[in-house]
Image (spheres, rainbow, N blue to C red):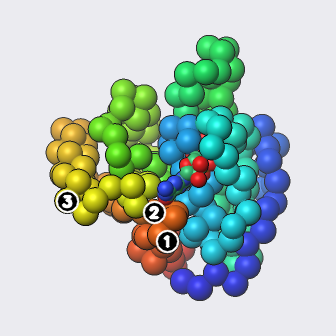
Amino acid sequence: MIIHSAQFIGSFPSNHKMPKANKPEFAFIGRSNVGKSSLINMLTNRTKLAKTSSTPGKTQMINQFIINEEWHIIDLPGYGFAKLSKKHRESLKKMIANYLKERESLITTFVLLDARHSLQKVDEDFLIWLGQTGLPFSIVLTKTDKLKQQDLSKQIKHFNATLSEYWDPLPPFFSSSALRKRGQNEILAYINSLIKG
Ligand code: GTP
Ligand code: MG
């Protein structure tokens, strides 16, 4: 898929405050600082479409973008950010859960996992919750440039093995690097296949 245009629509505190759900929507979620906003920029060939930061917790709202005037990207806040107060964390969690469960135009969600680490408890909890809702999702490993090929292969095996305990067949699985532009074609082709149905 060629990206002709990518624009920020707005930041919203809930599904109810968002514009009517009239286009296929694809959400990106994962732990704070995993690289959601960077991946969105990489996929759309933009450097500043989604705001990135080395400080975790940058994205705190439901950020909506329109791509090729045809489909939406949603940049969600990170989950499990330890430095936020419990109350704040709970309210973000509710915002995310309500959006995912209520958004009629949501086609699928990409759950991002840092390629360098093993599956964390917050990721596992979130994935299990998502599985229970019955909503479709894919896995995207991020920051693969930080690993040697051999270590990356090991990590992919680890994720496959761990996720196989819960899912059979496994959800679609992508490797990415925002820095090296890895995974762009594969993820965009997958999105395109879902839009074209
Ligand atoms: P929150 O909005 O705070 O939840 O974070 P986020 O998941 O949107 O992460 P963001 O894209 O802001 O990236 C966090 C940090 O990781 C930034 O310093 C990025 O430059 C860095 N980063 C993101 N993707 C990559 C990648 O593929 N490779 C490398 N080396 N660094 C990356
Ligand atoms: Mg972000």
* Residue found at x 64% / y 21%: 84
State the residue in front, 57 or 129.
57
Residue 141: quarter of image = bottom left
Labels 1 and 3 touching (C-beta < 8 A): no
Labels 2 and 1 touching (C-beta < 8 A): yes
Foreground label between 1 and 3: 3
* Residue underneath mark 1: 181
Extreme residue in the top direction: 86
Name the residue type under label 1.
Answer: Lys
Q: Which mark is residue 41?
A: none
* Residue underneath mark 3: 150
Q: Position of residue 89 (x, y in %)?
A: 62, 22
Q: Position of residue 160 (x, y in %)?
A: 21, 50
Foreground label between 3 and 2: 3
Q: Position of residue 118 (x, y in %)?
A: 30, 38
* Residue found at x 40% / y 35%: 123
* Residue found at x 62% / y 14%: 86
* Residue underneath mark 2: 177
Q: Residues within 10 Å of mark 3 (few under 14, many from 20)?
A: few
Q: Position of residue 121 (x, y in %)?
A: 36, 27
- Whole-angstrom CA distance, mark 2 to mark 1, is 5 Å
- Whole-angstrom CA distance, mark 3 to mark 2, is 16 Å
